[in-house]
Image (cartoon, rainbow, N blue to C red):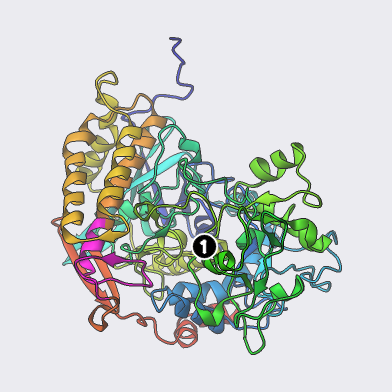
Amino acid sequence: MKTIKWPYANEFGMEEVVDADVLVLGGGLAGCYAAIAAARRGKNVVLVEKGATERSGSAGSGFDHWESACTNPCSRVTAKEIAEAYVNEQDGYSNGIAHYIECQEGYDRLLDMELFGGKIRDTEGEFKGAEFRDDKTGLMFAYDYHNRFTLRVWGSTFKPALYKELKRLGVKVYDRTEATALMVENKNGKKRGTGALGMNVRTGKFMIFRAKETVLTMSRPARIWLFNPDLTGLCEFRPMQSIGSGHAMGYRAGIEFTMMEKSVKGEFSSAGRSFPPYGTGNNHNTWYAATMVDARGVEIPYVDRDGRELKTVSERYYPAPGQKFFLKGGVIDDPKYEYRGPETLPFDELMKRGYQLPFYADLSRMPEMERKVIWGMMVGEEGKTKIPILKNYTERGFDPAIHMLQSYGNGWQSANFLPQERQLFGAPGGIMIDWDLKTNIDGIYAAGDQLFASDCCGFACATGYYAGRKAAAASETVELAEIDRAFCDAEKERLYRPMTVDAENGMSWKELNMAISKAMQNYCGGVKCKDLLLEGLDLLRSYETDIVPQISAENPHELMRTHEVFDILEVAKLILESCLLRESSSAPLCFERSDFPEVDPPENDHFITIRLDDDGKVVKGAVPKGYFGDLKTEYEKRNQDYIRGDLK
């Protein structure tokens, strides 16, 4: 077999020390905005990104809508109304702080984006006259045409524009560099973050980032329950490298998490178990509100909140009589009755009425502008749809004015995900924070998908910017800490160890990822109990002691993938431990325990937190669901400088 020479320099064993006022870990939307916010305040900012910041992160290939732009000039709702709706929709198991920031500051971040060069409005008049377009501003709206708080945007333009602004502001961007561990000092019984360690994923150079303040903006976990070693590129809706390393780093450092026991169906996790996201006809999210028909071509009616059948396409985009607004798009979990938008009838009801499978999305029955904005803008800007879906389907002859696409989603698919294949979707668990988006460890903040009950792109941008400006302010009273040489040496040894394992006798990261997924399916499925969870933990710990030392890597890229799976193993343990802590079942958390069947008893009706102490022991905590107080009042109490315009 021909040996291919590694094209990058060999820097294994070499070290580089980088100092920063504010260190941002993760170069997605949240990370870019955090860095920009801190740089605007004149701080020395360093951003560390495992991929290439210009196109990295969940939004690197694009996104189609910006939820909760409540302060845009056409909006008929307030930030308080929508943020409280998000909290109520999740029965209180939601991040009121982050959602209020999203709703109050999200439109400001869009205006920033426009200044950076991103496209947020129909400047060419392509959709002029459409019901969803405001002809005065050129803004285009989705889902709720009356209240106009969700905007359609050209998300594929955003990451390059952000990268250009980072460079203009002088942010030091370390691309192709994975963050692997948080540095924390302990003085007088009080922990404080002092930076992070990492590795260049092309050269193997060991990186030491000293920082006064650190902002975690990495991805939510993935590949926990589902992984197919033969289809690695198709395993996730999100990028391959977005697997939750920030959660693993934070857990090891003693950061407090909550809602990690929550899980919902893994609708966007492929791994051979689903169809290409948004590549099949449906009526949710990007395809909302496509006309749906059955196998005979009979149209399936939409109904409003009160069950009234809607006669026109236009009615699908408006609240029911007496309904203030409805949520659609950003929240994946089934919404509560008060906020449900126009939707097709439940599957069981459709069967009773005689509709025949399979179902199809038929855009040809929709007005031209509605058809055009779904197929060509929404499908095209959202996620990985531009090339695999829009371009490839079109080149192969698909014409939405003529053809239909079969639907496999919304409970109608022929291969539903099994209870043991649940994922961290919807508004999942994550890091517990205060009103500064600060963790329980001083000097460490979190934003975007690192937060519990995280949402979509507007959420990431708004919380990232907020955390960045809070970290920048705090950095003014902090000095850089000394490097803990012993900690650095131990981390370096941990990172490089797989390169010393004989490849012929070792195992690959894919085998370990597959084993973790199988363990989680078997011991942390839809129904949980103490014995199963403890068996699962014992098995994962055996992987740590018996399998991890056998994992081999032959180059820095394989080594990065190996580190990712070690982090997946850490997060899997975090989830199992969290499940053990909640000794009751819970409907809003999609959590069922056979040994504690009582659903949401009053004594457990709160956030259960989890962290590791200095000895690696699990520490349980309890936080009231409404701990953030009145959202508008508490926000304004802490952000008068921003409200005055001093920090925009």
Report the span colored magenta: 576-598
Of 487 and 18, the residue lying toward us: 487
What is the x, y in percent for residue 510? 35, 34
Q: Is residue 534 magenta?
A: no
Q: Residue at x 38, y 36 (%)?
A: 560
Quarter occupied by residue 251: bottom left
Q: In screen coordinates, is 290 left or right of 637?
A: right
Outermost top residue: 1
Residue shown at 32%/58% (left/top)? 526
Residue 91 lies, with reference to residue 239, above or below; the image says below
Task: Give the residue at the far bottom of this rendering.
Answer: 322
Between 331 and 406, the one lying in front of the other is: 406
Position in image of residue 237 (x %, y %): 52, 48
Residue 593 inside the magenta-drawn segment: yes
Residue 8 point in image, percent of width and height? 47, 25
Residue 450 in the image, given as x and y percentages of width and height: 41, 60
Determine the image quadrant of residue 304.
bottom right
**Viewer-proximal residue, 345 or 143?**
345
- Along the viewing direction, whichever of 40 and 399 lies nearer the viewer: 399
The quarter of the picture where the N terminus appears is top left
* Residue 241 horizontal side relative to residue 583, left or right: right
Q: Say whether residue 585 is left or right of residue 399.
A: left
Instruction: Give left or right: position of 104 versus 155.
Output: left
Q: Amino acid at mark 1?
A: Ala
Whether residue 400 is visible here, answered yes or no, is: yes
Q: In this figure, what is the number of numbered marks?
A: 1
Main SS class of the magenta portion in the image: loop
Residue shown at the point (47%, 55%) measured from the top left: 44
Residue bearing mark 1: 460
